[in-house]
Amino acid sequence: MASASPKKPKDTPAGKQRKKITTPLKGRNPLLWRPGGPSFFGNLVTTILIFLILMSAYSLASGLVQPSNEIPLSTVAADVAAGKVKAIVVSGDTLDLTYEDGTQKTSHKDPSAGLPETLSTYGVTPAELEKVSMTIQGQSGFQFWFLTLAPIILPLLFITFFFWFLSRQVRGAGMQAFSFGQSKARIIDPADSTQRVTFADVAGAREAKEELLEIVDFLKNPKKFLDIGARIPKGIILMGAPGTGKTLLARAVAGEAGVPFFSISGSEFVEMFVGVGASRVRDLFQMAKKAAPAIIFVDEIDAVGRVRGTGVGGGNDEREQTLNQILVEMDGFEPTEKVVVIAATNRPDVLDPALLRPGRFDRRVTIDLPDRRDREEILKIHARKKPFGPDVDLAVIAERTPGFSGAELYSLMNEGAILAARDSRKEVTQYDLIRSIEKVMLGPERKSHLLSRKEKELTAYHEAGHALVSSVLPNADPVHKISIISRGRAAGYTLKLPFEDKKMQSRKQFLDDIAATLGGYVAEEMLFDDVTTGPSNDLVVITALARNMVAHYGMSEKLGPIAFGERELGREPYSEQVAAQIDGEVSRLIEEAKIRAENVIRDHRGALDAIAKELIEKETVERDDFEKILIANGIMPKKRAEEGVLIAPAPDGTV
């Protein structure tokens, strides 16, 4: 059971999907193609086996296969003496015999002696030999030398090929060893239209695009800046929550300027061998200088750019040497080199100060989560290739997705298309997009997770408690939907969304959010005289929120406007007495919020029962039906100012 509210930025690394296939630069070739070959020892074994098989086949062919018509020389002499042989053709030591009956046979003689002398030793007289037509056929020069030298040359050629093949494999393995310190950057060629991204493909982030337009202008027309003595920043660091489009913006800068885009992750510099990361940095910057004007993009730079000397994140020499090499390379740039380094991170607080000083990453561009208008523009971009039904209203979807990043909006549109395809429909409807919002926020429906009658009633009152307290308290977000259908890890959920995007939150809003989140816990305790494991996630959320109010936001009346750091192993920013005071203030805030939630549920018990009954019957209650229940029980729903109704009811729920 969960109370779903707008997502807030998280300081966690984002997993980003990116295309690995890149197109080589035409006419530049700054990055050599290094194919990964098969194993050297595997090739060696294969070659030896082929050699043995060929030798065995040759032995079989030469030793076992004999011509079927070959006869010994003694038989030839007997046949000549008997007058059976008509003609003999002598070719070297080979005898081709033609008999009177037309039979063809073959034999061999001693190469050092002539045929008459050889046959006379077998008793053939000259008179008998004169009856046979004898022809001497000499071999050609090529055939003679080939037959003479082939037994020597062919094995030598095979052995030479064998050693050449082995040396080639050794050279390939050596090249792989030498390439270990070379950069693994992916390259996007500006001429590759399939991967080119421009600012037209990036919705929202208006201020960030205006800031980056200067970089585009510099890469296109550097002379205009250099003539007046201006130097464009060498490094730009993009800061923002995960999924806000930092990588997309960097690619758009390269696409607008029409320059090569070298992309690499900070973690790809770090290896277990000291010095490899620094070598890859040198190789990357060398390639970019050869291809200048160009852009180097380092994603998740906090992997190598953390503060040095603290031991945080490993603190090994390899990471620090890599960072030092990055600093040196950026210092070594000349104004005319026209290479710009863009880095992205969602943890700017952990970066080393040397990275952020003027002359390196001296320009910082913050990319915020998109507001309602930006979300609508982002949805339109992701809707380009999707067929929509006539009922689709992207403005409504943008209104119901506060706190969504660009990546989450893409996922929302994709999930909507998947839901339509699953139902074998050709168009995406508004209902598909509404369902996909909840799927992205909470996870898919768990239709197999069936609740018993008792659990269903308990879940209904739990979610009704969330919705009722949130609707009565003046600073809590209005309720848009309530459901007791399981999604993700939650048995039910209450969807609370603000009418307008919030850039800041006040102390009163935090206190009302804590009370509304405790509404389910209080409803279980008051109505069933017991509590379950259902509110466990609610308790985690309110405890973290209350602690942030006290220790980070200075919203404690007792401790005052003081921000306390995080207590970590080996780092104690405050004493045990202060820690105890913080714990006491957290408990007090939660206890006061619980009392407020109890008062709301006690004063509006009829509304609670009506909401729970509707949930048990329908399982899902939308905003319009929910507001009718509130009005029937004397509670004025929260409305927008332009709707002509009070934005919030009085604290006691009356108008």
Image: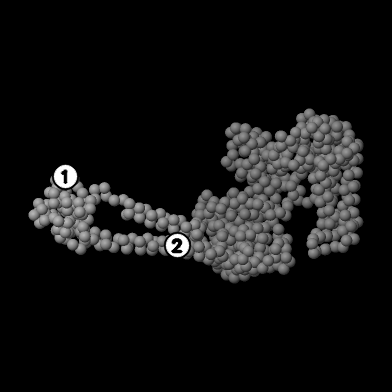
What's under tag 2, amino acid-wise? Answer: Leu
Identify the residue at image location x=57%, y=70%: 334
Identify the residue at image location x=14%, y=47%: 84
Q: Residue furthest front?
A: 123
Q: How many marks?
A: 2
Left/right placement of residue 522 relative to residue 418 reads right
Q: Residue furthest top?
A: 617
- Residue at which label 2 appears: 166
Q: Secondary structure at mark 1?
A: loop
What's the mark number on residue 102? Answer: 1
- In the picture, the quarter occupied by the N terminus is top right
Task: Indicate how the structure is coloured in the image.
Answer: one colour
Q: Residues within 10 Å of mark 2 (few under 14, many from 20)?
A: some
Reply above or below: 145 against 405.
below
Comparing labels 2 and 1, the label whose residue is closer to the camera:
1
**Percent position of residue 565, x then y:** 81, 60
**Percent position of residue 511, x then y:** 85, 48
Q: Secondary structure at mark 2?
A: helix
**Mark 2 → mark 1, Cα distance in angstroms:** 55 Å
Left/right placement of residue 596 relative to residue 79 reads right
Reply above or below: 546 against 356.
above
What's under tag 1, amino acid-wise? Answer: Gly
Identify the residue at image location x=69%, y=37%: 435
Residue 259 in view: no
**Percent position of residue 137, x then y:** 17, 57
- In the picture, the quarter occupied by the C terminus is top right
Q: Residues within 10 Å of mark 1 (few under 14, many from 20)?
A: few
Marks 2 and 1, the one that precedes in the sequence: 1
Residue 283 in view: yes
Q: Nearer the viewer, residue 152 or 35?
A: 152
Identify the residue at image location x=87%, y=52%: 586
